[in-house]
Amino acid sequence: MRQEIRLILGILLMAVAGVTASAEVPDTLPGAVEHDSVVPKKNIVRKVLDYFSTSNRTPSGKGFDVSVIGGPHYSSDTKFGIGLVAAGFYRTNRLDSLTQPSNVSLYGDVATTGFYLIGIRGDHIFRNDNRRIDYNLHFYSFPRYFWGLGYENGNDMDNKSRFKELYVHASADYLWRLVRNVYFGPAVEFAYVNARNRHRPELWDGQDSHVTSFGAGFRAQFDNRDNLTAPTRGFLLQLEQRFLPKFIGNDYAFSYTDLRMCAYRRGWKGAVLAARFHTRLAYGNVPWNLMSTFGGSNSMRGYYDGRFRDKGEMDLTLELRQHVWRRNGLVFWLGAGTVYPKLSKIRFSHILPNGGIGYRWEFKKLTNVRLDYGFARGEKSFIFSINEAF
């Protein structure tokens, strides 16, 4: 409880900092006499305030607009930590103001649990949005919990057991625009995982503790969102297919299909209504680390990432995003999801509820720092991240 109180205080301090940074700080006090020949030196506090007060402004004539934010945070998974994010926007053609900009984020994190993470992700938009590259590369080491495979194991809190996960993942999709808002192209993926110090190895059902996977396939999507990082209107329909056959070096030969639908609509003043439906079905000899799952910072927030694992997963989220004042906003969401071995095995009693509330601060134009508090069945979680969950 004390940790949650400290976290809530931290959120309030961030809100105050956002309000302070949004306000213009006068260079001189009212009534003071200005001297053109004297330029007052700025102390470190003033420099920080000036930096954040202008971080969301769009610079003119700047080829690459990058800003850095970092500091302490708390989450239920990693406990107290220090994170750093460098977020940037750029255009392949500076004269083209109609095509949405490319984005890239370099992020790192360390926490008191022994967790550490480094990664880079982004979307490179070619001239006139004729082509796109979507990429993500990250590495982490994390003392984690494992419940086993299947809904029943995940629902049994007595199965909660420790292990240390070393994980490397890389993916890239190269998309061509076929017609307006319709894209298609090849996709590749690599994953390596090593589960060390497993306290209850029987929960792995005899699977290897370390798994290397290579995959290839395609992505097809319809995308008319107004932007990729904080959409306010539009629709995304995305289908991904991956094949991981044995002949290219996979110990576990399997495939999976991933379908995602997102819709965004402006409501009353300052409001955006967002909805996301996602399902993923893997088939074949699927390794434990690439089972379908939810939880963490982007889907079914509040559930521990990887608590529920099975071949199939399905979830739905409805979210209200409300701008409140200046660079501050709030979000509220409700959702539900489940995991299953195959479609015919979906059970209504296995549908899990989800909901939560979050705070948003506009760090940069189209880039929000978010603090979410998610409620789940039997657990809850604080989440600190950048950009919207979907």
Image: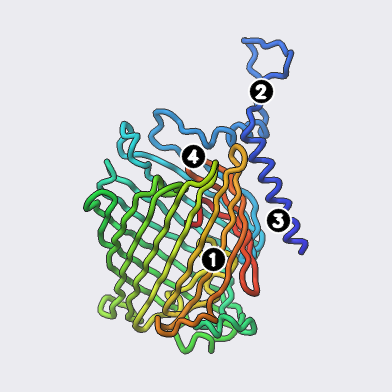
Q: Which of the labelled discs sits on residue 26, or is there none?
A: 2
Which amino acid type is shown beneath numbered disc 4?
Lys
Circle 1 crowding by C-alpha within 10 Å: few under 14, some 14–19, many from 20? many
Q: Work out whether 215 lies above or below 37.
A: below
Which amino acid type is shown beneath numbered disc 3?
Leu
Q: Is mark 4 on a helix, strand or loop?
A: loop
Circle 4 crowding by C-alpha within 10 Å: few under 14, some 14–19, many from 20? some
Circle 4 residue: 365
Q: In this view, does 17 lie to the left or right of 237?
A: right
Residue plotted at (40% across, 72% down):
280
Circle nearer the N terminus (4, 2)? 2
Which amino acid type is shown beneath numbered disc 1?
Gly
Across and down, in percent, residue 62 comes to 41, 31
Q: Work out whether 292 lies above or below 202.
A: above
Q: Work out whether 235 lies above or below 374.
A: above
Disc 1 to disc 2, how far (Cα)? 45 Å
